[in-house]
């Protein structure tokens, strides 16, 4: 059973609209614990019965549903599939044991599941998922309002043109909304600033996409339990599959959480191997993507950093001294080598895809890795926020108003 958190220890949020959650679980004790933890942040409705829960959905304005998978009357996926036609916009989250994960994966597209969380959940993980769910709901609602405004602006068009335009809008809306929704899901699952501030003394993230979605992803977690105290950071790129690569990042987020929190794997090379295995198992051969990945594991007890990468590197700066941790080539997944160094006070750490230094100017010249490394070296006296502004300013100057030719992912941080 989850421990109820002392609300006085939680930062008091600014006054804003409270969104409504519905939690469905046949165990009443679980409902009481959930409500005690989250009623300060949300309007929490609970039900031990899926049929009763449907009545609540029909009577109340609910933005997010959290349901247990194993219930006597119907499973969580059956419940979500049942309500989908009448409540397509509600964000759906499911709680499950590890043994039910395959059934959940099968139901993700069928039921419109936003996220599944393995039990037992912890407060920080659940609160982060709920906050991202609300953000996704708001962004989708704003998107729908904007599209409606665009559609309404066409009412004065001549009848035949209006009919043809409406037909095209319906087709485009379905296509664009599908792509936009994938992008919104991806954005919502990136570590937000508040979450990163709890893990790092200082940090910045640059995540710039060429299209509405990205083939790249930044992920991090902190596990501090009894004798274990680890921070894990990963940067992933799925090369060459477009929106398929974007959807793969959503799977990678869940897999990395499972490998670290459930299986307690804290060897960077083994994380990469297991991640590749799980991703290859998800989908047909036609959906396979070339994977570039880096994983950094900080052991705070041993005061060491362990790094592994496949076609990605990592730079550590301590003052003007720099250490480049090189990743392996793409055919070395099974024996990914782990470099280990000591954690030095005030060191700055950078993980990145090749997107920034592959950006081309109007003459078709790439920025280059050498310039990128020298630029990072030149800003070591600045805060991480100032470093981000410097990197973005130089990027805009280099591009001179032209669009990106590649996605960009960079995370810089100090422990």
Image (tube, grey):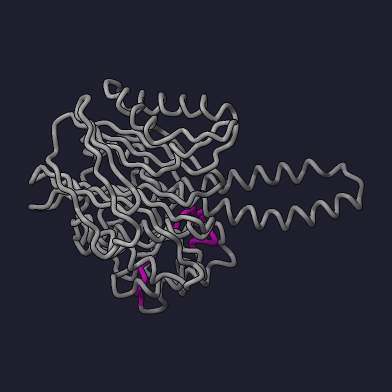
- Vertical order, 327 against 386 (above or below): below
The x and y percentages for residue 62 are 49, 54
The verdict on residue 22 being magenta is: no
Taking the image as shown, residue 355 lies to the left or right of residue 172, namely left
Taking the image as shown, residue 228 lies to the left or right of residue 69, namely left
The residue that appears at 32% across and 22% down in the rendered structure is 378
Magenta part of the chain: 56-71
Taking the image as shown, residue 157 lies to the left or right of residue 406, namely right
Q: Is residue 352 visible?
A: yes
The residue that appears at 88% across and 44% down in the rendered structure is 157
* Residue 114 placement: quadrant: bottom left
User: Quadrant location of the C terminus?
Assistant: top left
Which is more toward the observer, 334 or 210? 334
The x and y percentages for residue 209 are 51, 43
The residue that appears at 46% across and 33% down in the rendered structure is 367
Which is more toward the observer, 409 or 19? 409
The x and y percentages for residue 409 are 41, 42
Q: Is residue 35 visible?
A: no
């Amino acid at each position: 059973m989850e421990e109820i958190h002392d609300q006085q220890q939680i930062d008091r949020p600014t006054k804003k609209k409270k969104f409504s959650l519905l939690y469905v679980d046949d165990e009443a004790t679980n409902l009481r614990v959930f409500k005690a933890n989250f009623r300060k942040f949300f309007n929490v409705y609970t039900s031990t019965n899926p049929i009763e829960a449907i009545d609540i959905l029909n009577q109340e304005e609910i933005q997010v549903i959290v349901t247990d998978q194993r219930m006597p009357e119907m499973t969580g996926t059956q419940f979500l599939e049942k309500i989908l036609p009448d409540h397509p916009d509600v964000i759906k989250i499911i709680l499950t044991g590890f043994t039910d994960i395959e059934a959940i994966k099968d139901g993700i597209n069928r039921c419109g599941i936003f996220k599944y969380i393995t039990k037992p959940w912890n407060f920080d993980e659940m609160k982060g998922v709920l906050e991202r769910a609300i953000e996704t709901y708001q962004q989708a609602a704003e998107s729908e309002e904007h599209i409606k405004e665009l559609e309404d602006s066409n009412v004065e068009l001549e009848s035949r043109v209006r009919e043809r335009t409406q037909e095209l809008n319906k087709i485009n809306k379905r296509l664009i909304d599908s792509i936009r929704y994938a992008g919104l899901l991806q954005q919502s699952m990136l570590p937000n600033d508040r979450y990163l501030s709890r893990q790092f003394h200082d940090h910045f993230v640059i995540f710039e996409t060429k299209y509405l979605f990205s083939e790249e992803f930044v992920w991090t977690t902190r596990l501090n339990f009894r004798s274990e105290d680890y921070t894990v950071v990963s940067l992933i790129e799925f090369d060459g599959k477009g929106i398929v690569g974007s959807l793969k990042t959503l799977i990678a987020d869940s897999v990395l959480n499972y490998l670290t929190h459930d299986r307690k794997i804290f060897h960077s090379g083994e994380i990469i191997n297991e991640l590749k295995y799980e991703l290859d198992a998800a989908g047909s051969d036609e959906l396979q993507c070339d994977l570039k990945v880096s994983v950094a594991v900080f052991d705070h007890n041993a005061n060491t950093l362990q790094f592994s990468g496949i076609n990605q590197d990592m730079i550590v700066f301590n003052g003007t001294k720099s250490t480049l941790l090189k990743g392996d080539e793409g055919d070395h997944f099974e024996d990914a080598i782990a470099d280990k160094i000591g954690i030095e006070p005030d060191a700055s750490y950078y993980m990145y895809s090749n997107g920034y230094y592959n950006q081309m100017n109007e003459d078709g010249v790439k920025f280059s890795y050498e310039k990128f490394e020298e630029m990072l070296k030149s800003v070591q006296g600045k805060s991480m926020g100032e470093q981000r502004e410097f990197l973005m300013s130089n990027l805009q100057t280099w591009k001179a108003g032209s669009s990106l030719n590649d996605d960009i992912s960079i995370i810089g941080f100090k422990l």
